[in-house]
Image (tube, rainbow, N blue to C red):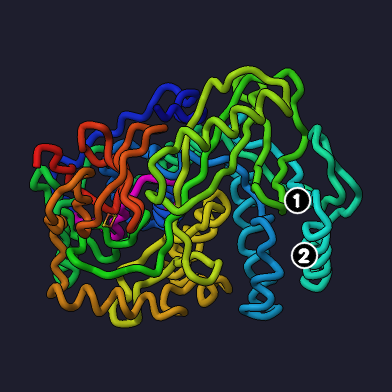
Amino acid sequence: MLNSLWLETAYPRTAYPPATMDTTCDICIIGGGLSGITTAYLLAKAGKKVVLLEKDRILEGASGNTTGKLTTQHDLVYAGLLKKFGEDSARLYYKTNDAAIRFAQSISEGDELRTANSVLFAQTDSGVHSLRNEAAVYEQLGIPFDRRLNFELPLPVKETLTLTNQAQLHPVRFGQHLAKLAQSEGVQLCEHSAVRSMNLKDKSLQLSNGIVIQFDELVLCTHYPIEALRGMNIMKLEVNRSYLISAPADMPLQGQYLSVDGPKRSVRTAYIDGRPHFLLSGETHRAGSTSDTTIHYNRLSDELQSIYHLGEPIHTWAAQDPSTPDLIPYAGPISKSMPYVHICTGFRKWGMSNSLAAAHIVSDQITGRKNPGIPLYAPDRTGFGTRLFQAIKTTGFVLNEFTGGHITRAKAPICTHMGCRTRWNTGDETWDCPCHGSRFRKDGSVLEGPATRPLDLND
Ligand code: FES
C-alpha cells in the first residue's frame, strides 16, 4: 500500500476545521495542493478575502506524492518548447519557472527546501545527441548551464547537462509552511469540505454539509478543472502515473538526476530530520492502463538493491498528474466569457515549480498585476478553455456532483466520473480509472478525482 515518504514525515498532520458557516468571500479556491495554497497566500497578501476548500486533508494528493524536485530542468523540455512556441515563449517558460524557485527560496525557513543542482544524464549515443541538442537550446535561450561531467551515481554515463542553483523540497513540509503563512494572511483554510454543487452564474457553491460559499472569483486547483461536471468530455488532459521508492542511505547525493534514455529514472536524496533518504522513481505509464503495478515497484526495488546496494525500500508510493497537449500547464480564466473562473492544472509531473508559477499567474491576473507568463499559460491557447466554457454552458452553469454512467458490471466496478470501467491495481490496492485518472480505495471511496462519488462495489 502507498506510504509516501513525505506524508509519513510531515508531523503533526494538519487539522484545519471544515467550513461550518455560510460565507461570502472575494476568492474561493478549490483544492488544497501547492497551487491552491500558494494562490490563496498570494491573494490574501494582496488584501483579498480568501476561502480555500479541500475535500480531504491538504497536500495529500499530487503534492504529497511527488519527487519534490523544484527545478526549471523539466526533462528535455526546452528543445520542444522552442519548436512549438518559438524562442521568446521558451525563454519565458524558463523565466517563469525560475521565478517560482526564487519565490520558494525566499519564503522557506526550515529544512523543507534545500538548494541542489539538477543533472540530466545520457548513457547512449542517442541520449548524447538529445542532450547536446538541449544544451544548444539552453545556449540560444541564455539559460546558464554546466556541461562538465558531473555525476555521482554508480552507472555508466556518457554526458551530463547541469543546471546549478535549483532546489529540492520536502513538498508536504513546504506546503504546510505555506499554509501557515496563508493562514496568517487571513486565508480561511477548510479541510474535509467537499463541494456538492456550483452555480457559476450566481457565483456560489454548496458543500456536502449544506454550507453555501458566495464568491466573486473562483479558482479550481484540482487535477481536473471541474470535477463535478456531468458528462463533460475533456479528453485533452492525459494522466500519467509514476512510481517512487525510498530507503535510508549513508551516502547523500549533492545533485538530483534524471536520465534522458529509457527506462527513465529520477534520483535524489531527501534530508529529513538530519537523515538522508535515497529516492528512485520512474516506470511511467498512462494512469489506469495496467493492473499489475507491483511489477513497477519490483523493478525499482531490484535496482535499488543491485545498483545502489541499498536494502528493501521503506517507502513506496505513486504519483499521477495530467498533461496538456503542448507541454505548458493551464493557469488562468477558463475563457473570456467566464473571466471569474480560473483553473490551474496540467503540470506534467513538474508541479513543484509549475504549481508555484501557475499560482503567481492566476493571482496576478486577479489582482491586475502584470505577469508576462499570463498568455503563455492561458487555458484558451489550445481551445481548451472555450470547450470547457461550452460544456459548462450546456449545464446552465450549474454543476452538480457527477452521478456516473451505469454500465453493466463484468469484473471491475464502473468509475463514477463518466462511466469508464476501472482496473484493480494490485500494487497499491486501489481501483484506477484509465479515462481521467480517478482512483478509489479498496472499499470504493474516492482517493483521487475527478470522480467525487464512491464506487458501487455491490452491483
Ligand atoms: Fe473519468 Fe473515470 S471516467 S476518471
Quadrant field for ligand 1:
bottom left
Asked if the residues shown at circle 2 and circle 1 are in contact, with their CB atoms under 8 angstroms apart, the answer is: yes
The picture places residue 89, in percent across and down from the top left corner, at 64, 76
The residue furthest front is 410
Spatial distance from mark 2 to mark 1, Cα to Cα? 10 Å
Badge 2 local density, few (<14 within 10 Å), some, or many (20+)? some
At 67% from the left and 43% from the top, the residue drawn is 167
Q: Amino acid at mark 1?
A: Leu
Q: Amino acid at mark 2?
A: Glu
Give 377 or 251, whichever is nearer the viewer.
251
Residue topped by disc 2: 134
First-in-chain label (2 vs 1): 1
Q: In what element is the residue under mark 2? A: helix
Quadrant position of residue 298: top right
Residue topped by disc 1: 120
At 49% from the left and 70% from the top, the residue drawn is 325
Give 279 or 300, whichever is nearer the viewer.
300
Q: Is residue 49 left or right of residue 376?
A: left
Q: Which residues are magenta?
A: 24-35
Q: Does 26 appear in magenta?
A: yes
User: Which label belongs to residue 81?
Assistant: none
Q: In what element is the residue under mark 1? A: strand
Q: Does 330 appear in magenta?
A: no
Look at the image and tell me in which quarter the C terminus lies: top left
Q: Is residue 179 left or right of residue 341?
A: right
Badge 1 local density, few (<14 within 10 Å), some, or many (20+)? many
The picture places residue 174, in percent across and down from the top left corner, at 52, 37
